[in-house]
Amino acid sequence: MKIPESIIEGAEVLAGAPVADEIKREVKEEVARLAREHGVRPCLVVVRVGEDPASAVYVNSKVRTSEELGLHSEHHALPSETTEAELLELIAGLNARDDVDGILVQLPLPHAIDEARVLEAIDPSKDVDGFHPMNVGRLSLGQNVIAPCTPAGIVELLERSQVELSGARACIVGRSHIVGKPLAQLLLQRDATVTICHSRTRDLAGVTREADILVAAIGRAGFIRGEHIKPGATVIDVGINRVTDEAAARELFGDEADKRLETIARRGATIVGDVHPAEARRVAGKLTPVPGGVGLLTVAMLMKNTVAAAKRRRGL
Ligand code: GUN
């Protein structure tokens, strides 16, 4: 395939911030309208169990963004010794409260707690993550449903960046319940030809190189190399990995490593996606950065989902 002129200088950066800001602006307007016309203020409750530092950062960002947009939010930070029964009791209470529109239990949970049981306990109409089996089933039937935030954010980013989905070949590397599988459903609904790859896929590069849209959601720093990417493809990097080693950062970022080395010196680590940035920049047509890409959209979509849940549950 001929490499398009526009990418000879390197891939176009598909930044998350402009699209996330646009979605948040829309949500803020809708929140103001609901208050004005219906006297309703949607309420999101975020529950976190244990001391995972990454989860604490994500949860704080969710709570802060809710406040910024005028949503009401409540944050329950429970100790790591919390039992499954105690968590289920909290959820039952939140299900019963009429003022609560959205319930999000941050994953992963401590090993002693059965994640599936907890997710199933959330009232499907308040499930702003779209993880309840009822909502997973509805999504796979193509019904209008609250879809998981990260996949929904990826679709918003692609659509609002004028990336053609209908008829496109999309390849998702990673088959998680949070990203890979629901994203496959959303892209299929938009008439893409979807392939899901995983750790047992044979000739991975042979499969991924067919893709016009390549999504990496595997949780391994820099795993997707230049050889995996069709020249000119749109590459979406969902990975959030901590790299602490300077030599590894140099290898990943090439002549743009200086800022990353500074970050490692200052904070002990830099955040790297699942895509090898220096190699992907040379081959891809469009590429989401890490940080500053898909992660910002996840939070924006949670806000959008919470408002949608509030409207639906209250019949507005
Ligand atoms: N942990 C990582 N991503 C997510 C997410 O989208 N929702 C929840 N609840 N937990 C997560």
Image: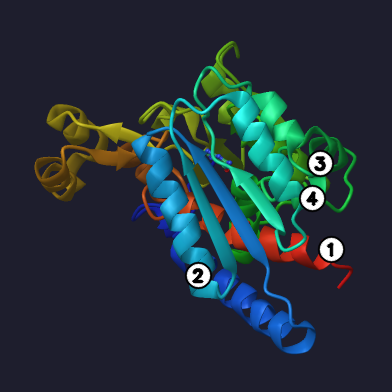
Q: Are marks 3 and 2 in contact (CB under 8 Å)?
A: no
| Label 4, label 3: how far apart the Cα atoms are | 18 Å
179 w.r.t. 17: above or below: above
| Label 3, label 1: how far apart the Cα atoms are | 14 Å
Numbered circle sitting on residue 312? 1
Q: Amino acid at mark 2?
A: Glu
Residue positioned 46% across, 25% down in the render: 81
Numbered circle sitting on residue 135? 3
| Label 3, label 2: how far apart the Cα atoms are | 27 Å
Numbered circle sitting on residue 190? 4
Q: Are marks 2 and 4 in contact (CB under 8 Å)?
A: no
Q: Amino acid at mark 4?
A: Arg
Name the residue beneath numbered marker 2.
67
Q: Are marks 3 and 1 in contact (CB under 8 Å)?
A: no
Of pointers 1 and 4, the one earlier in the residue sequence: 4
The residue mark sitting in front, 3 or 1, is 1
Q: Secondary structure at mark 4?
A: loop
The residue mark sitting in front, 2 or 4, is 2
Q: Secondary structure at mark 1?
A: helix
Snapshot quadrant of residue 175: top right
Of pointers 4 and 3, the one earlier in the residue sequence: 3
